Image (tube, grey):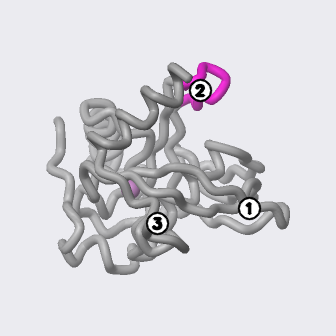
Amino acid sequence: MILGVALLGNPVLRGIARPFTAGEIAAPETQRLVEDMIETMREYSGVGLAAPQVQVPGRLVVMESMGDPPAQALPLQVLFNPELSLAGAETEEDWEGCLSVPDLRGKVPRARTVRVKALDREGRPLEFIAEGLHARILQHECDHLDGRVFLDRMTDLSSLTHLAEFRRISKEAKSS
Ligand code: NI
């Protein structure tokens, strides 16, 4: 089922989401929520979605990127209770958008590499290091669990760009 996406201004996007217990992860309604979040992310061509964005104040994110370029492809990942820590000092700035902040793109500085501890879809613990686009999406989605959107992380709002202009810029960049 495709879920409604909360838009900026909705208080659910500014709250602190609560962790899932093992029992809650295994519950059919939670597994159904995971399915619905994946379907919703794909329907709206997002590369990630956090539960608060579909009005559920819990610590759950889904991510997937088909890859553009293909080297940036990210297989479907479902994480409960993710915890991020820095795995390097390097930061980089790149464009981000958000289904809860429609039609805007902005340049956001993020850590290049992060260490992730989380539970997978079946509630099994996992730990890994992510970098580049994967690390960026993780930081963006985990911010949603703490009531933050990418606009809060921008250090210079002058890069904020309407999607129509962004498409024009990327077209020019590609053709030059
Ligand atoms: Ni977002």
Q: Residue at x 77, y 50 (%)?
A: 129
* First to last magenta residue range: 67-75
Image quarter where the C terminus lies is top right
Q: Which residue is mark 2?
A: 73
- Label 2 SS: loop
Q: Which residue is mark 1?
A: 91
- Label 1 SS: strand
Q: Amino acid at mark 2?
A: Ala
Q: Amino acid at mark 3?
A: Thr
* Residue 165 on image: x %, y %: 32, 43
Q: Give the Cα separation between the discs numbered 3 and 2.
A: 31 Å
152 up-or-down from 110: above or below: below
Whether the residue carrying mark 1 lies under 8 Å from ligand 1 is answered with no
Q: In this rendering, which labeled residue sits more in front, label 3 or label 2?
A: 2
What is the number of callouts on the image?
A: 3
Taking the image as shown, residue 30 lies to the left or right of residue 92, namely left
Question: Does the stretch in magenta take in 74?
Answer: yes
* Residue 107 on image: x %, y %: 52, 57
Q: Give the Cα separation between the discs numbered 1 and 3.
A: 33 Å
Residue 73 visible (yes or no): yes
- Label 3 SS: loop
Residue 32 vs residue 48, the one in the foreground: 48
Q: Mark 1 or mark 2: which comes first in sequence? A: 2
Taking the image as shown, residue 105 lies to the left or right of residue 5, namely right
144 up-or-down from 69: above or below: below
Taking the image as shown, residue 82 lies to the left or right of residue 112, namely left
Disc 3 crowd, CA 10 A, few/some/many (<14, 14-19, 20+):
few
Q: Mark 1 or mark 3: which comes first in sequence? A: 3
Q: In this rendering, which labeled residue sits more in front, label 1 or label 3?
A: 1
Q: Which residue is mark 3?
A: 21
52 up-or-down from 103: above or below: below
